[in-house]
Amino acid sequence: MSSFAVEKSTPNLSAEELSVWLTERIAAHLEMPADDIRPDEPLGAYGLDSIYALTVVAEIEDHLGVTLEPTVMWDEPTVAGLVDVISAELPLAA
């Protein structure tokens, strides 16, 4: 996977860019290749525990300038589901 730069308050972030960035962050915590993470597979299947899940939520908030419920990764346990939730929280392009 190619890496996209994701900076705080990026209004033009595409769903693809967000998916790649999120997958890479999750893969780093799991110490596995990002290419092995499927967007529709529950993250618990890869061994993502609650500590890492909360850490990823904090990274999303810090990097994108959005506020998410701490339970978002349990409510939307896949990369695709998280991308949908995060995209809805991002400011629209001007």
Image: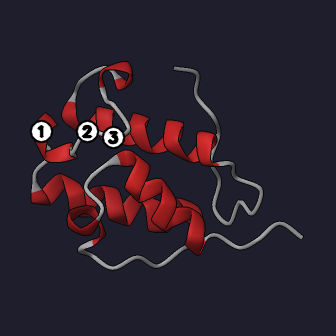
* Above or below: residue 59 compared with residue 40: below
Find residue 40 and name its label. 3
Give the CA separation, mark 2 to mark 1.
Answer: 7 Å
* 51 left or right, relative to 20: left
Question: Which percent across, then down, holds residue 88?
Answer: 58, 71
Quarter of the figure with residue 91: bottom right
Judge the density around disc 3: few (<14), some (14-19), many (≥20) Cα neighbours within 10 Å: few
Number of marks in the rendered image: 3
Judge the density around disc 1: few (<14), some (14-19), many (≥20) Cα neighbours within 10 Å: few
Mark 1 residue type: Ala
- Helix, strand or loop at disc 3? loop
Mark 2 residue type: Glu
Question: Which percent across, then down, holds residue 72?
Answer: 30, 70
Query: What residue occupies the far front of the structure in this picture?
Result: 40
Quarter of the figure with residue 89: bottom right
Q: Which residue corresponds to mark 2?
A: 41
Residues tagged 2 and 1 counted as in contact (Cβ below 8 A): yes
Residue 60 seen in the current view: yes
